[in-house]
Structures are given as structure tokens and as C-alpha cells.
Image: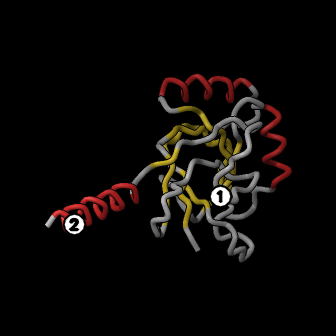
Amino acid sequence: MNRFLIAITLSLAGIASAHAQGKVEPNPANVCSDGDFKSHELCFKTPGDGVARAETLSESFYAVILKTAERCSITEDERLEAQKLFPQTKVFSMRFYCDDNIEENISYTNVNDKFGFLAVYAGRTLEEAKALLVEVKATGRFPGANIRKMQAKLAYP
């Protein structure tokens, strides 16, 4: 009977960890050691427990959406230009399902997948996001900038 309880407990722990949410790495100077994140992706800690998953989510965070555009139209050069304006926090873009690239495994929650976007990480709280939005608007370069609460989502191939 004890083995049965241990097996159930371990099974439930695996289920709970399947919903674990990874800590975001917002500093663009730090390289994400987990997974094969690309320069345009917001990276986060992924579980290293060997449990098979269809996807893993990051913790919730706020972003300032700098620009929304036609899907797959935002370039890496454009992202790098925006990154220069915010050197302390990650500027990222949506490239999921672009260019028939099966290696694009990061998407984001609370966005319309029919469009692409350019965004900057704005913190874990709404207050942090509001402060960054003021900074973004002060540049005069992103008139439609807005705050969005989201999560990064890693889909396993």
C-alpha cells in the first residue's frame, strides 16, 4: 500500500509541475541558459524535471506593446533599433509560425496570433508597466504603445 501512495504522490507532483511557470529573464545582457531561445524571444526558466509536456508557460508579466503589424513583418533590425532605446530591459517580437520555421517555438498569451508585435518587457506589476509606458511615450516613436499582461509560451515540437 505504501508504494501505491508514493506512486500517486509522485504522479501528482508531476502534474503540478506541468503547470509550473518559469521565471522570465528580462535583462537583455543575460543569456538564457534554458532551451534554445532566440534573440527576438523573451526567455524564461523551463522545467528540468524530464516530464513530457506539450507546452510550458512563463510567469505572468507586463509588456508595453510598441507596435502591432502584419504577422511576420517585424524584422530583427527593427527589434534591435528598439532595443537600443531600452538597454536595461528586453525588447522582443512575435515570430511564431513565421517563414515556415519549425524552430519557432515561442508564442505569447493575451495577443491576437493573426498579427505580429514588437514589445518591451515592463515588469511584474502594473505600476512598473505604467512607469515604462511613460518612458516609451516620451521617445515619441511609438504613439500607439499600450500595456498588456501576458505570458511567454514554449511549445514543444
Could you tell me which quadrant the C terminus lies in? bottom right
Q: Which percent across, then down, holds residue 79?
A: 78, 47
Which class describes the residues within 10 Å of circle 1: few (<14), some (14-19), or many (20+)?
A: few
Q: Which percent across, then down, holds residue 154?
A: 56, 60
| Three-letter amino acid code at the position of disc 1 | Gly
Could you tell me which quadrant the N terminus lies in? bottom left
- Residue at (70% x, 59% y) in the render: 36
Q: Which of 120 and 37 is in front in this view?
A: 37
* Label 1: element kind: loop
Q: Nearer the viewer, residue 142 or 107?
A: 107
Q: Name the residue under label 2.
A: 3
The quarter holding residue 99 reads: bottom right
Which class describes the residues within 10 Å of circle 2: few (<14), some (14-19), or many (20+)?
A: few
The quarter holding residue 73 reads: bottom right
| Three-letter amino acid code at the position of disc 2 | Arg
Q: Which percent across, then down, holds residue 52?
A: 46, 69
- Residue at (79% x, 31% y) in the render: 85
Q: Which percent across, then down, holds residue 86?
A: 75, 31
Q: Compute the Cα span from label 1 to label 2.
A: 34 Å
Question: Which label number is shown at residue 89?
Answer: none
* Label 2: element kind: helix
- Mark nearest the camera among 1 and 2 is 2
Q: Mark 1 points at which residue?
A: 35
- Residue at (51% x, 49% y) in the render: 58
- Residue at (33% x, 61% y) in the render: 15
